[in-house]
Amino acid sequence: MSSTYDVIIIGAGHNGLTCANYLARAGLKTLVLEARSVLGGACVSEKLIPGGTFSSCSFVQIMLRQEVVDDLELKKYGLVSIAPRMQEMGLWDDGARIMFWQDADRTLQSIEQNNRADGENFLRFVTRLRKFGDITRSMLLSDPCSAEQLRQVFTEAGEPELFNEFVMMSADALLSRYNLSERLRGLMMFMGLVSTWGGGETPGTAYVYGYHAQGEFEGVFNRYGLPVGGMGMISDAMADGLKAHGGEIRLSSPVRKVLVSEGQAIGVELVNGETLYAPVIVTNTDPKRALTTLLDPKDLAEGLRAKAEKIDQRGSMARIHLLVDALPDYVGFPAGQQGLHHEGMAILGAVPALYDQARIAQARGEFADDYVIEALIPSALHPSLAIPGHHTLTLGVQQIPFELAKSSWPERRKEWTDRILDIYCRYAPNMRQHIKGTHTITPYDLEHTYNITGGNIFHASMVGLDQLFDQRPFSEASNYRLPIKGYYLCGAGAHPGGGVTGAPGHNAAQRILADLAGLQDKKLVRERNSPGAGAAVVDAMLNTRVGQKVGYMVARSRLFRSFTDKMNRNR
């Protein structure tokens, strides 16, 4: 086995595998080193409980860029995903519900059963969200620009206020602008609070919301899919594609440090003492780990090390995985009947006040009395994930502290698990007697098992302009180049940020290839197909009050489903 490569990548998370694929396909001899015995990082499927396969951390395919799927031929290498017909359900303990379907007319009708005025206002909001996505989409797979340059892009598009709404505001202020009812705001706000330190009224959470909500699945805007084998199926397809193009992956190979000689990265030293060499070292770790843990202090200027230590990584989450022998009888639904409401994601108890309570508890290092909970039953759509007669059920909670004011996460794990299960069973009263196994992943586990410093799945906060765009993670370490020659960052701490997108891995690879070709000063931009003439006409129409009325009537009619489906495609 050779100990010399063209490129060594630290970390076999999905971004590391994405970057490795592009570099291997360009003819570079590429090695990926993974500390754990399984690949995928936070995009992984694991048998956490006997009898079930679980998506440990990330659990829906909504942000993975279609360009990456196509470029890396992920379907050819085994990726199969299906979009649930009922995508998302907001459920409250009085049995009231709002259901987001693949079909716009069904969604609007469900929304209006909760509040008649919400339907038209929701469509007006989604039109603006779609416009935000159209303007920013090419930015995701390009070198980062500055916030002011992005503001100028919005201004030139005739949409300066859209920048203010979706970049500068809080999620609550953004949604309130469209006169949405409290429950609909609470349901939609959840995506703005993923791995954030703060609440719905925290400035900048509107960008976290827009960043997530402009996702797509197979070219369809704001839709997600579930991989048949769990999220690890994405990483497995990437690994198979990499090996097919000559790349190498070594598991159970933790890196102790990056070797630097005269300001140039030259290789890595593994924990077992083995030394491997390459003129290009790429890290998929979080940037704080990349610049402090993996580098000898003498190799990084003191001022830069201080900046790395100050990277804001606050904001974490937790997952509780369950193996159950019955499906939940959610309040308001017939007991004992499997339905489409089991296939999609459920957001339970979402109201703005709960997010504010969680924000206060988070800041104090405490547990809140109540939480908004996300719940997903992947085996309801893909039965092969669980043994016969059983299901895999995953609960997620945001806005929780990494450090607790009293005791520690390992000591309070059971208390936390019981508290969240008590809340969950308010919405699914039958489930307590059907739980056959649990596995809880706390912020402590995200750091110590999944190697995510601070338990922030974004690797660095995405709330506020000081760590976004060309300031991500900070100016001297942006553009995928860390402040050591030949040392690059390809993970979620680089532009454009977190989520299972493949974008940082794609962008880092393009930057590396350009640098190796002597094109260090070339701005790399990957243009996305612009909306067709028909979509442009629809956008113009929906910017008028009369057009919005007509668009609402069209979207609400089942007769126009094929038309609205076509308009919902990004290309």
Image (cartoon, rainbow, N blue to C red):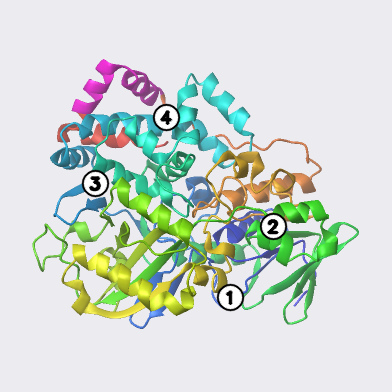
Query: How far apart are the two marked residues, 4 and 2, measured between alpha carbons?
Result: 37 Å
Q: Residue furthest left?
A: 334
Cα separation between marks 1 and 4: 41 Å
| Horizontal relation, residue 532 to residue 98: left or right | right
Between 79 and 89, which is closer to the camera in this rendering? 89
Residue 24 in picture, x, y percent from top left: 67, 58
Where is residue 544, by image quadrant?
Answer: top left
**Considering only order in the chain, which callout, 4 or 3, is on the residue closer to the N terminus?**
3
Give the amino acid at mark 2.
Glu
Q: Is residue 262 magenta?
A: no
Residue at 21% from the left image edge and 41% from the top image edge:
107
Rendered position, 220 above or below 549: below
Does dot 4 land on a helix, a strand or a loop?
helix
Q: Position of residue 139 (x, y in %)?
A: 56, 37
Tell us which disc is closer to us: 3 or 2. Answer: 2
* Figure check: 410 above or below 279: below
Nearest the viewer among 495 and 438 is 438
* Residue that mark 1 sits on: 36
Q: Mark 3 and 1 residues: CB-CB less than 8 Å, in contact?
A: no
Q: CA distance from mark 3 to mark 1?
A: 38 Å
Which region of the structure is painted magenta? Answer: 533-553
Q: Which residue is mark 3?
A: 101
Q: Which residue is mark 4?
A: 131
Inspect the image, locate mark 1, and give the three-letter code of the amino acid beneath it: Arg
Q: Which residue is mark 2?
A: 309
Which quadrant of the rendered structure holds the C terminus?
Answer: top left
